């Protein structure tokens, strides 16, 4: 069975925590990373340690999972090799030989572009220029990088053969629906589509392989960089609510806003979501911080969850009330 986990807003929804929690609970045989590339950071807190990941799947903390980087992902070899070494995951990491490679000149073009770095607010990691070269059929592939040779594989073949044997697969997207180059707030978007269907394509799986699509929302959405944000609040209001966050990759302060139900409905429809994971519920009511039972949530928090379910018509099955694995409410047994 394949479970796809993608972001429903502008990234920063807490996918790293959700993916790592689900991997520890469900124990998939494979965790495959989809998405754009190292321009998205995922934060995982586990056993007292905090990890900021840019290419490694967040499910790496489940030590029996094979970790794969799909062909649709752009790889910066310096970032990838540094993460493999620091996390000690070399023996279980596979990089698709068709992954596009980010080189120094892509980063230079990204940072030096008045449009990308200035107007759009690019992360400066080279993804946009690299995808330009990919469309121009001039981008280097992973099979051409000697330092990656020992990790190369055919991710699509591995996953399809694993599914034929009845093994479990997680597909982990990056960034969020609102940054899709097709359906997001264009031109203030990333350089490719970010929906569940493209996440499947990134790792070489067809749409019929998806069993569950878990869409991750944050109770107060945020975004880094420029672009429309219909429900944005000013920094003073965010600070009163205790919402002060910074991007994992850029270190820039995130813009915050109120939950956008219209955007959520569109995201659910286009991603064909079967479940919702809701993070940062403790921002709605700080008294709920660390609660791990739905019955112990306040009426205010429960009302917010119920409003989401009523208005987007998809069950909220995972609720995060803090950054650690224990601060999670898992309702899948009751709602599915």
Image: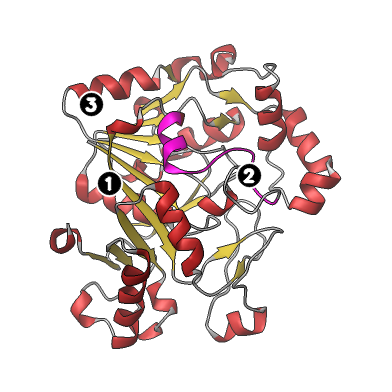
Task: Point out which mark residue 23 bears.
Answer: 1
Residue 105 screen position, x and y as percent = 77, 28
Q: Secondary structure at mark 1?
A: helix
Label 2 or label 3, whichever comes before in sequence order: 3
Nearer-N-terminus badge (2/1) = 1
| Disc 3/disc 1 C-alpha distance (Å) | 17 Å
The image position of residue 123, as x and y in percent, is 68, 48
C-alpha gap between disc 2 and disc 1: 27 Å
Q: Which mark is residue 163?
A: 3
Q: Position of residue 145 (x, y in %)?
A: 59, 16
Asked if residue 312 lies left or right of residue 263, the reply is left
For the point 33% across and 74% down, the residue is: 305
Residue occupying image coordinates x 54% and y 76%: 243
| Mark 2 vs mark 3, CA separation in Å | 31 Å
Looking at the picture, does residue 306 appear above or below residue 110?
A: below
To which residue does mark 2 refer?
190
Quadrant holding the N terminus: top left
Q: Is residue 173 above or below residue 282?
A: above
x and y percentages locating residue 265 in the rendered image? 43, 61
Residue drawn at the location 20% of the way across and 46% of the way down: 26
Q: Is residue 257 visible?
A: yes
- Whether residue 321 appears in this view of the structure is no
In screen coordinates, is 107 left or right of 40? right
The stretch of residues the image draws in magenta is 188-201
Label 2 Cα neighbours within 10 Å, binned few <14 / some 14-19 / many ≥20: many
Q: Within the image, what quadrant is residue 293 found in?
A: bottom left
**Residue 191 shown in magenta:** yes
Question: Closer to the observer: label 3 or label 1?
Answer: 3
């Amino acid at each position: 069975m394949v479970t796809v986990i993608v972001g429903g807003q502008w990234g920063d929804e807490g996918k790293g925590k959700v993916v790592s929690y689900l991997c520890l609970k469900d124990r998939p045989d494979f965790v495959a990373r989809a998405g754009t590339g190292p321009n998205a950071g995922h934060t995982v807190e586990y056993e007292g340690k905090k990890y900021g990941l840019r290419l490694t799947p967040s499910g790496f903390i489940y030590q029996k999972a094979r970790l794969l980087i799909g062909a649709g992902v752009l790889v910066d070899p310096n970032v990838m090799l540094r993460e493999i070494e620091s996390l000690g995951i070399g023996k279980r990491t596979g990089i698709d030989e068709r992954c596009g490679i980010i080189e120094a000149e892509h980063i230079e073009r990204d940072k030096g572009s008045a449009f990308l770095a200035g107007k759009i607010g690019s992360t400066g990691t080279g993804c946009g220029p690299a995808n330009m070269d990919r469309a121009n059929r001039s981008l280097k592939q992973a099979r051409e990088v000697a330092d990656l040779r020992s990790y190369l594989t055919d991710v699509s073949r591995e996953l399809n053969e694993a599914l034929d044997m009845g093994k479990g697969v997680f597909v982990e997207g990056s960034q969020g629906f609102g940054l899709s180059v097709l359906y997001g707030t264009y031109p203030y978007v990333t350089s490719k589509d970010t929906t569940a269907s493209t996440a499947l394509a990134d790792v070489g799986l067809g749409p019929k392989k998806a069993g569950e699509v878990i869409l991750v929302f944050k109770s107060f959405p945020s975004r880094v960089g420029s672009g429309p944000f219909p429900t944005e609040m000013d920094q003073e209001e965010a600070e009163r609510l205790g919402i002060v966050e910074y991007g994992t990759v850029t270190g820039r302060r995130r813009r915050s806003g109120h939950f956008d139900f219209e955007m959520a409905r569109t995201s659910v429809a286009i991603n064909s979501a079967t479940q919702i994971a809701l993070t940062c519920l403790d921002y709605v009511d700080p008294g709920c911080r660390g609660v791990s039972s739905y019955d112990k949530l306040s009426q205010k928090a429960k009302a917010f969850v119920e409003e989401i379910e009523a208005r987007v018509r998809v069950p909220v099955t995972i609720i995060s009330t803090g950054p650690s694995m224990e601060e999670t409410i898992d309702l899948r047994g009751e709602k599915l």
